[in-house]
Image: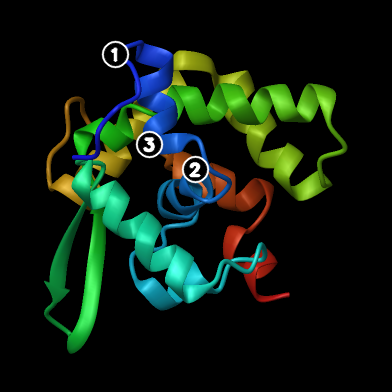
Amino acid sequence: MREARSRCPINLSLEIFGDRWTLLVLRDVVFGGARHFRELLGGEERISSNVLADRLAVLVEYGLLTRAGDPSHKQKVTYSLTERAIDLVPVLVQLSSWGVRHLPVADEYAARAEVLTAGGPPLWEAFMDELRETHLGTRRGEAPDGSTVAERLEAAAPFRDRRTE
């Protein structure tokens, strides 16, 4: 791991997340379901391939993503969230909620943020469990009856449609 400037928890966190792109890469994996380099490269913010490769390497280095060969295609790599990254869901929700309250956020982003904000910590935990099942193959709680949190977010505003516009 890279040398830290200080052992302050805010500084140490900023050593990982303190650039423009890292949280956006995580956003696309967490909320958009992106698992491959090309999917992440297609985001509307237009990250360059060299910056994306660097951010993915940093996220793997710090244990937020794992990298594995894709069994469906020899040249593809699949990225998966780790428990450390899944633990960031409440932080991402709070950051998004703050943005909705204080910044000129597009309606589709606000709709997704409002679903998570209104659902509060119980909904975040359910979503985190869905992510655990998808990325880690485990769950802490029982699968809910009815629609998943991911389905509710998609119903509020489709994530992938925004990325292809």
The amino acid pointed to by label 3 is Ile
Question: Are the residues tagged 2 and 1 within 8 Å (C-beta)?
Answer: no
Residue at the (23%, 68%) spot, across then down: 78
Q: Which mark is residue 23?
A: 2
* Image quarter of residue 68: bottom left
Neighbourhood count class around disc 2 (C-alpha, 10 Å): few under 14, some 14–19, many 20 upward:
some
Badge 1 density bin: few <14, some 14–19, many ≥20, Cα 10 Å: few
Within the image, what quadrant is residue 93 found in? Answer: top right
Q: Nearer the viewer, residue 37 or 147?
A: 37
Side of 86 where 155 appears, left or right:
right
Q: Nearer the viewer, mark 2 or mark 1?
A: 1
User: Where residue 7 is drawn, which disc sits there?
Assistant: 1
Question: How far apart in space, not on screen, are marks 1 and 3 (Cα)?
Answer: 13 Å
Classify mark 1: helix, strand or loop.
loop
Which amino acid type is shown beneath numbered disc 2? Answer: Leu
Task: Tell me which residue sits at (43%, 47%) in the image.
Answer: 26
Q: Residue 94 — which label?
A: none
Look at 75% across and 49% down and name the residue there. 108
Marks 3 and 2, the one that precedes in the sequence:
3
Secondary structure beneath label 3 = helix
Determine which residue is flagged by label 3.
16
Q: CA distance from mark 3 to mark 2?
A: 9 Å
Q: Earlier in the sequence, mark 1 or mark 3?
A: 1
Could one spot residue 144 in this view of the protein? no
